[in-house]
Amino acid sequence: MSPPSAQEAANKLFTNSTILAPMVRASTTPLRTLAISYGASLVYTEELVDRSIMDTERVINEELGTIDYIKPLSSFPGKVQKRMLADSDNPDCAKGAILLRIDPTLERNKLIYQIGTGEAGLAIKAAERVVGDVSGIDVNMGCPKKFSVSGGMGSALLSDPKRACDIISTLSRNISKPVSAKIRLLHPTDPQPTLDFVRSLINAGANAITIHGRIVEDESQTDARWETLVEVVKSLKHSESVPIIINGDLYTHADIREMRKRSGCDGVMLARPALYNMSLFKEETTYDDTCQTTTEATTAEELPLSEFQTTNHHGHYGYNSPLLSPRTSIIQEYVSYCVRYRNHSKNAKYVVCEMLSARRAPLSRVPFLNMSLEGGQTVNEVCQCRSLSDLVKIWDVKNTLPLPSAQNNATEDVGGMGDLHNYSDDYFLKPDLFDKKAAAKDETGEEKKTDEETPGAKRQKI
């Protein structure tokens, strides 16, 4: 029997799928495997830029049972090497930067590598580097951040369909596994620009498409544009045969069920909602819809989508659904997974803070998100952590593997990993000040002081 085609493989992977989204700093091994344990059918790596993955060494890590893609220590400047060697809480730094760590036992047939690229030639080199260890290659065409767009990657490709199609075509011609793309809506209300772009990608060889329900200019605190998203997906499902996945503000099982029904999509992808409560990936148990509460019985078909989005869903599929696990226990599990996979402590801390914070949630959803925890842990407490052992103590985690020693508790960035692990705690503790700092950067990328900033105060850059 001949092996399945890339399209047949994509149909199997993406049909009826629930997917953990690619999230920078977050979608590393611990979060991905945690999502799988809760029922995610697919998980994406964080976006990894083509040139960075091309320069890695593939190493079988027999101790952890993982496959590691490592940027060698010798490739860093001498000063950075010294800091990495001194990072006793993250002993893997002594080998170099772990860009990608894969658990082949748990992630087999479930892992998609998301590539950040703007050139077909670089894209294929990066894809060929990892394709043997993943189930598919996804091209990031939605990230609106300056670092991505300025390199011709991410959402920059939305305005350059010729280059976007060249990347997809080159990948699909040269690798035998599914090639997909994650995009955004191209217009707030008119579905046609998005339809034209998606169809051009499909004609170029894309085996699946994920559409995020916001345009590039939208802030995360605004509601996703579900009505436009539904129009786009319904039209695509009428004329195209590749799987279409939707993404954006699916915070409850009610959201997921309603958007599946209204759009006819093949799968759903969760990003911030998964950080809020990973047990959204749990399979829905058998439930007698005739036992619905009055609130539930007010079926969504009677509500415009814009109103449905801002409704406090009660009952079996709502914000307090019995299908959901306590958030405290989920965070404890996540920290345990970080220990299991020796995740970099700064990444672990960042993800826990994201789990505790609603700062990027749509403002209409915030009143319905219960951010309190049984143990009373806070973002401020987590921001004081300098090691995995600190996180373990705060969350009272019982470990299955010994922790690395944590002799170096200095507050400086000893990881030497640059953008991989370095960020400012102000992102969570002082979001308004952080946003002002970001907005004050001039065109050269230099950071200007704001009025609220203490003269001479030490700053970390995100």
Image (tube, helix red, strand yellow):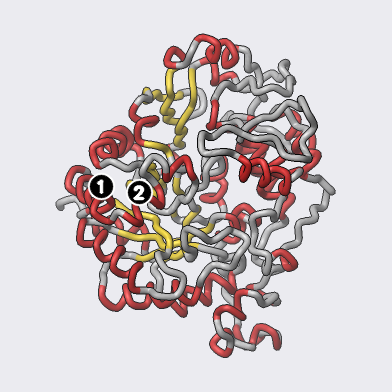
Up the image or down, 13 lies above or below 411; here it is below
First reached walking from the N terminus: tag 2 or tag 1: 2
Q: Quadrant of residue 199?
A: bottom left
- Viewer-nearest residue: 59 or 129: 129
For disc 1, the marked residue is 167
Q: Residue at x 56, y 38 (%)?
A: 442
Residue 444 picture location, percent across and down = 51, 34
Q: Quadrant of residue 456?
A: top right
Number of numbered callouts drawn:
2
Left or right side of 195 for 91? right
Q: Residue at x 69, y 46 (%)?
A: 331
- Viewer-nearest residue: 36 or 367: 367
Q: Are marks 2 and 1 in contact (CB under 8 Å)?
A: yes
Q: Residues within 10 Å of mark 2 (few under 14, many from 20)?
A: many
Up the image or down, 42 lies above or below 246; here it is above
- Viewer-nearest residue: 196 or 179: 196
Q: Residues within 10 Å of mark 1 (few under 14, many from 20)?
A: many
Left or right side of 389 for 240? left
- Measure the alpha-carbon separation of dots 2 and 1: 8 Å
Amino acid type for the residue under numbered disc 1? Ile
Secondary structure state at the residue bearing disc 2: strand
Q: Residue furthest right?
A: 376
Q: Residue at x 33, y 77 (%)?
A: 235
Amino acid type for the residue under numbered disc 2? Val
Residue 139 marker: 2
> Is residue 76 something one can see in this rendering?
yes
Q: In the rendered view of the protein, which quadrant contains the C terminus?
A: top right
Up the image or down, 338 lies above or below 305; here it is above
- Viewer-nearest residue: 299 or 330: 299
Residue 264 picture location, percent across and down = 40, 76
